[in-house]
Image (cartoon, rainbow, N blue to C red):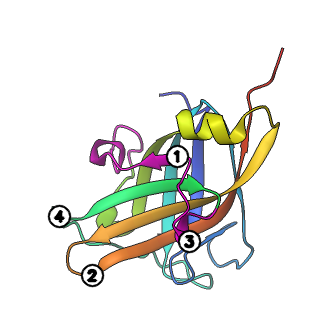
Amino acid sequence: MSDLNVKTLTIDFDRAALITQAEDVTIQSLYFYRGNEYILQANCYSNSYSSVLQGFGNAATDSWAVYIGRVYENNAAPVCVITNPALFNNTTDWSSANVLAGLISARVNVSGTALDTDLANLSSQTYNFELVLTNNVGGEVMVCDANCYVKNAVQK
């Protein structure tokens, strides 16, 4: 695996925020290029002031999802949806992936018809990135909610 499209994320689970590093409250944004595939390696900390990782249950009925959209939380249709369980928490993508320890990975392909239509010929667009855990017992949990920017491919 090439590390060209690997993004390491630091998540404050308490605020569902993407932060710059453990023990730092500074919010960070994500940047993607349309049509590229990324391996997201997320270190989930219990809060911004801690270096204690936030572990998750490993129930067979739990599922993970990534949504990218304008305002997904208000039921607007996301432009990218990743829900295939085979794309999450694979040690082949990230050898440290361990849900119980709070080390989450996701393979995210930033492409699709909805994104093509929404982005059209714009050079970039601002979206919302969401990493969601659906736990059979606890329900849906927002693990990360962050601004993201999708840039269009360089035009010739």
Residue type (three-letter) at the residue carrying disc 3? Asn
Magenta highlight: main SS: loop
Residue type (three-letter) at the residue carrying disc 4? Thr
Residue at 54% over, 70% down: 73
- The answer to if 79 sits in the magenta stretch is yes
Label number found at residue 98? none
Label number found at residue 61? 4
Residue type (three-letter) at the residue carrying disc 2? Gly
Q: Quick one: label 4 or label 2, which is nearer the N terminus?
A: 4
* Residue that label 3 marks: 74
Q: Quadrant of residue 16?
A: bottom right
Q: Quadrant of residue 102?
A: bottom left
From the viewer's perspective, is 68 left or right of 125?
left
- The answer to if 111 sits in the magenta stretch is no
Q: What's the distance in space between the residues labelled 4 and 3, CA to CA?
A: 26 Å
Q: What's the distance in space between the residues labelled 2 and 1, CA to CA?
A: 25 Å
From the viewer's perspective, is 39 left or right of 91?
right
Q: Quick one: label 2 or label 1, which is nearer the N terminus?
A: 1
| Coordinates of residue 48 in the picture (x, y in percent) | 62, 81
Label number found at residue 138? 2
Q: For the residue labelled by badge 4, is the local secondary structure a helix, a strand or a loop?
A: loop
